[in-house]
Amino acid sequence: MGPHAAKQLPDGDPTSVLRRAPFSDNPRVGARGQRAHQRILEAALQVFGEEGYHRCGVIRITEVAGCSRAAFYQYFSSKEDVFRHLAGQVARQLVASTEALGPVTADLAGWQTLRAWVAHHGEIYDRYEPVFEAHQAAAESDQAVARDPPASPTATSRACGPSSRHRCCRAGSSTRRSPSSSSA
């Protein structure tokens, strides 16, 4: 993840939820609006996972979220916009995880620190797998996503290995690339 990813994409911070114009004179939202916003993000994550990036659409996201299209458009301009918000959440969590990494020393404590960090990255991947899976398709049609991609599945696969539950990490997976083919 590049150093500016969290700044280029929406940061995913629930306290930064704003209503888009012209839906309100006051763009700030309360607790109910934040819950609606989060419900839409959760639905989009599910739909991106089930249908992929190109087949995903606003109508399906709103059906899963249990909200109207008007409610969707209060917070997001398009499926691309909601994907950018999800990518922003991924970026924010990966950056926070990396910043929280303690010293990796040449002893048992260092090994445990590193293992905990890798495990946390695995949890982020598990939670946001549809974002990682759909990222390439999104980047092909959205320059805001293409500028600074989330951590690649290649990096995850090197950390997780062939016994991983992650589709991109398992031996023989079509999305798995060898470390020598990555562009680190």
Image (cartoon, rainbow, N blue to C red):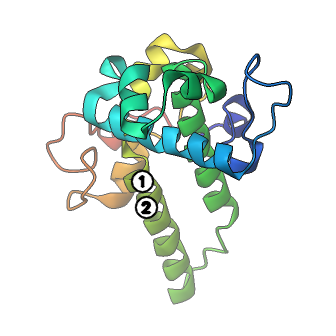
Residue behind mark 2: 123
* Residue occupying image coordinates x 73% and y 30%: 19
Say which of 31 and 150 sits in front: 31
Q: Which mark is residue 32?
A: none
Say which of 184 and 49 sits in front: 49
**SS label for mark 2:** helix
* Residue occupying image coordinates x 67% and y 35%: 5
Q: Where does the N terminus fall, quadrant-wise?
A: top right
Q: Is residue 139 left or right of residue 133?
A: right
Work out whether residue 152 can be spotted.
yes
**Compared with residue 68, is residue 2 higher up or lower down, i.e. above or below?**
below
Q: Is residue 123 left or right of residue 177?
A: right
Q: Which mark lies nearer to you, 2 or 1?
A: 1
Q: Is residue 180 left or right of residue 22?
A: left
Q: Position of residue 59 (x, y in %)?
A: 39, 21
Circle 1 crowding by C-alpha within 10 Å: few under 14, some 14–19, many from 20? few
Please report contact status of discs 2 and 1: CB closer than 8 Å, yes or no. yes
**SS label for mark 1:** helix
Q: Position of residue 97 (x, y in %)?
A: 61, 61
Quadrant in the rendering for residue 43: top left
* Residue at the limit of the structure toward the bottom, as seen here: 108
* Residue at the limit of the structure toward the left, as seen here: 172
Q: Position of residue 138 (x, y in %)?
A: 45, 21
Task: Kindly identify the amino acid type of the residue bearing the numbered disc 2.
Answer: Glu
Residue behind mark 1: 127
Say which of 179 and 125 sits in front: 125
* Residue occupying image coordinates x 64% and y 68%: 101
- Alpha-carbon span between mark 2 and mark 1: 6 Å
Q: Position of residue 108 (x, y in %)?
A: 50, 88
